[in-house]
Image: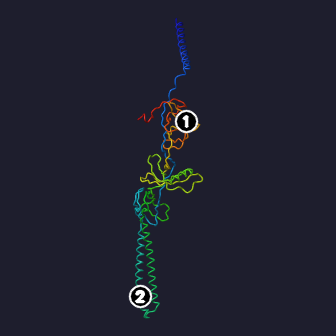
């Protein structure tokens, strides 16, 4: 009895397996005859090619350099008695910065002034002697030698006074070196010497350094093939420069101030210097910045850069027509922000795929979906 149940169970299992395989075979044949179900549409995001004014820009890395930099050094051998600024502060032209000990110079000024006073008194006495001896010599009451000696005394006293006046002027100039003031407006560095330090004219390290931060220069290089367009834009006064600090959205406007008179023969690059107003001191001297030199505006067809794909045949885009994506080869130009200029192969208003290329092929059916950012909002 048990054996018979096992035989019935095996027969039933065989019938079920056979029915399953027959069903699959029948469905495969029916699909072959009917041509199979239509392939599913690939969801994609799209955008339209647009013809608009596009700036012709040249991007390069530049360096911020100050227009003026002054290293403050002592012109006397003396001691610092006062520092009148904070490290890194902004100073105006003429602000007092350092005061040096000038007591020795002031003492020398008094000594020389006394010599001048004595020489002037001797000169006055000698002039009186000349007047008196002139009258006596006219009456033959005194020898002519006495008159000549008096005249010589006048000349000596006058020369002594003039010589010491020149020395006094020199001492006054040196006394002016005791008060060091800012020769330009800008940012001052930290003071390398403090009150009590002895400074000399032969010191190599400056006491402090002032750099001009408003305006500043931005120096960058461009390829020599761009020089003709740059010179034309400068002649037409259409060239503008923007400097951007990497990692920040802030930018500073400026104008091209000069083009170096030679091209570097080893690199084929030409140096350009732009003047940036830098009113808020966004550009710090020594900083690397991204410069955008805009020469002119041109009308061109542009698409989002994400729409352009690179294949073995070159640059391609997927153009959507009647719900079908077709591959089209294009010639691309420069990239402007998030758009790419299409020089040939695409017309204004055509729809291109910007997202979903991975599952696309030439002639694939597509379904347009909203961009992720729009769907999220």
Callout 1 environment at 10 Å: few (<14), some (14 to 19), or many (20+)? some
Between 190 and 369, the one lying in front of the other is: 369
Residue farthest to the bottom, as pictured: 140
Q: Which residue in the protein does label 1 denote?
A: 328
Up/down of 96 relative to 239, above or below: below
In three-dimensional space, the C-alpha distance between marks 1 and 2, rounded to whole angstroms, equals: 114 Å
Comparing marks 1 and 2, which lies closer to the viewer?
A: 1
Q: Which residue in the protein does label 2 denote?
A: 131
x and y percentages locating residue 143 in the rendered image: 46, 92
Residue farthest to the top, as pictured: 1
Q: Quadrant of the C terminus?
A: top left
Residue at (50, 62) in percent of width and height: 204
x and y percentages locating residue 55 in the rendered image: 49, 46
Q: Determine the secondary structure under disc 2.
A: helix
Q: Determine the secondary structure under disc 1.
A: strand
Question: Which image quadrant for residue 173?
Answer: bottom left
């Amino acid at each position: 009895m048990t054996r018979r149940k096992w035989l019935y169970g095996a027969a039933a299992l065989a019938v079920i397996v056979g029915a399953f395989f027959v069903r699959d075979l029948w469905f495969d044949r029916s699909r072959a005859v009917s041509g199979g179900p239509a392939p599913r549409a690939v969801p994609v995001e799209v955008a339209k090619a647009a013809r608009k004014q596009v700036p012709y820009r040249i991007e390069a890395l530049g360096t911020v350099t100050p227009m003026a930099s002054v290293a403050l050094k002592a012109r006397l051998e003396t001691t610092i008695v006062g520092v009148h600024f904070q490290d890194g502060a902004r100073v105006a032209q003429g602000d007092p910065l350092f005061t040096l000990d000038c007591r020795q110079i002031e003492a020398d000024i008094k000594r020389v002034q006394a010599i001048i006073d004595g020489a002037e008194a001797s000169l006055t006495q000698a002039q009186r002697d000349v007047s008196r001896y002139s009258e006596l010599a006219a009456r033959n009451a005194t020898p002519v030698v006495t008159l000549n000696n008096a005249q010589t005394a006048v000349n000596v006293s006058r020369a002594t006074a003039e010589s010491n006046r020149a020395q006094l002027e020199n001492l006054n100039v040196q006394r002016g070196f005791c008060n060091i003031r800012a020769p330009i407006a800008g940012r001052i560095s930290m003071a390398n010497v403090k009150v009590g330090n002895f400074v000399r004219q032969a010191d190599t390290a400056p006491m402090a350094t002032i750099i001009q931060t408003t305006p500043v220069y931005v120096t960058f290089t461009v390829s020599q093939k761009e020089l003709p367009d740059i010179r034309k834009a400068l002649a037409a006064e259409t060239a503008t420069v923007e400097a951007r600090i990497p990692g920040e959205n802030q930018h500073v406007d400026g104008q091209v101030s000069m083009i170096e008179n030679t091209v570097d023969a080893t690199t084929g690059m030409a140096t350009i210097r732009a003047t940036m107003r830098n009113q808020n001191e966004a550009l710090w001297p020594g900083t690397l910045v991204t410069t955008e030199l805009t020469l002119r505006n041109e009308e061109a067809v542009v698409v989002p850069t994400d729409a352009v794909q690179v294949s073995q045949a070159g640059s391609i885009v997927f153009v959507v027509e009647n719900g079908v994506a077709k591959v089209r080869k294009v010639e691309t130009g420069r990239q402007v922000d998030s758009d790419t200029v299409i020089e040939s192969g695409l017309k204004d208003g055509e729809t291109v795929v910007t997202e979903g290329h991975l599952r696309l092929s030439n002639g694939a059916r597509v379904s347009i979906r909203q961009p992720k950012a729009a769907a999220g909002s």
